[in-house]
Amino acid sequence: MAIDHFSANRLNRRECLAFAVAGAGLWWQSRPFDLFAADVVVPARHDLLVRTETPFNAEPRLEKLANAFLTPVENFFVRNHGTQPVIDPRAYRLTIGGAVDKPLSLTLDEIAKKFTRVSIRATVTCAGNRRTEFATEKPVPGVPWDAGAIGNAEWSGVRLSDVLKLAGIKAEAKHVWFEGQDQITVNGQNRTFGGSIPLSTVLEGQPAERVILADRMNGRPLTAEHGFPIRSLVPGYIGARSVKWLSKITVSDRPSSNFYLAQTYKLVEENAPEKVAAASPIYEFLTNSAICDVQPVAGTDKFAVKGYALAGGRRGNRIAEVNLTTDGGKTWQRAKLVSPVVDFGWVLWSAEIKVPAGTERIQVKATDSEGTSQPARSPWNAQGYQYNGWHSVLVKKVT
């Protein structure tokens, strides 16, 4: 037997052999401190599967995702909603306002000098990851992601809680809004990407470093396409809440009115305006997993299988086990977790499993420490978000 393909739905795939990111001329000035180091912010070059050219959206080949606990930048998916901004770090200002005692306008130098540097390992996943699997039921709009719109990295920056503490949080504050600098056209209207998260998410834990303003990814300054010079990083939440090219933070008594929180990134059965308005925004990602690579074990009836698994995005919730089936769920074979197991981060797993002659597909499901397992199929929704049914690869008999 051999693997036919790595998704239940084959797509037309084109490689992007050499993609030079806009903003290639951005250079970081030398600075006598560590937070924003004297490094060149170089454009990434890709061996990614391009899903849309304009705006540019691309994901890695699945077999590359299972090779490293920390996803190399060149293998990290790219999600854009509009034109990528070109930002001069010398002119950059991050403003903090709204329900605060002292509004702030901070340069990169000021951020570096005023706040303590922290790091966190966390997974970022697009809410539309695995969207193409909804299409087996009926079509959905949006970027046609396979299972690669996900990546795990070490993010470094400063605690958002420290920044808000300096500004002074007023009693009525309940939400934190983020706004980026990308320019987006939706239905003929110009927009910027943004959203918000509950203030309680920012302040939870001791110290409260779950949410950071990240300037580095895997020890290097952010590339332009991943949010240079600063992005919000909200572990446990869908990627849309980790806003790139961050320019403005607003503390408020209510959720953001930004289009990408108020009118999209919601689970609805139809896109009628009244249905969308009544639905709650998506925050936490769901327990999920995928098979990234399958190879026959020479001289046996076994296959070596490996992939990733991600627990639902709550503090303390981690992957407990990963299981594989070759008979549609009648029997299961347990995989081994082969990477660190941390809050808000994926785990990598591997297994050698028996694949009887005539097997049509291998499927995987993960179970988290709260006891939640993936369903066999995800309920369809009109915007194609949060698919987390059992992931499948097809196999065929070699003749």
Image (cartoon, grey):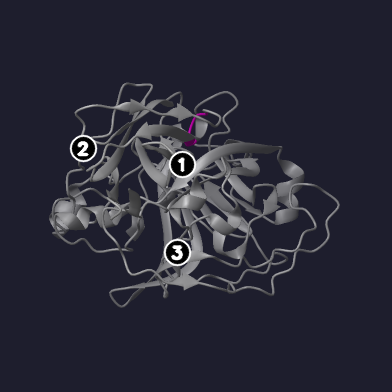
**Which mark is on residue 63?**
none
Outermost residue to the right: 32
Residue ID at (25%, 53%): 133
Q: Where is residue 284 in the image (x, y as percent from the top left)?
A: 37, 38
Residues in magenta, as a range: 342-347
Mark 1 vs mark 3, CA separation in Å: 34 Å
Give the residue displayed 33% in from the left and 60% down from the top: 259
Of pointers 2 and 3, the one earlier in the residue sequence: 3
In the depicted view, which residue is nearer to us: 165 or 337? 337
Which is in the foreground here, disc 1 or disc 3?
1
Mark 1 — residue? 298
Question: Foreground: 356 or 126?
Answer: 356
Give me the residue at 20% from left, 36% from top. Answer: 328
Tell me how far mark 2 sits from mark 3, CA to CA: 27 Å
Give the residue type that dot 3 points to: Ala
* Residue topped by disc 2: 376
Residue 155: x, y in percent?
61, 44
Tell me the kind of residue under disc 1: Ala
Residue 343 forms part of the magenta stretch: yes
Is residue 62 visible in this depiction of the protein? yes
- Residue 375: give x, y in percent of width and height: 22, 35
Depth order, front residue of 117/190: 117
Horizontal side of residue 252 vs 163, given as left or right: left
* In the depicted structure, whether residue 138 falls above or below residue 361: below
Are the two marked residues, 2 and 3, in contact with CB atoms closer than 8 angstroms?
no
Provide the residue designation for mark 3: 58
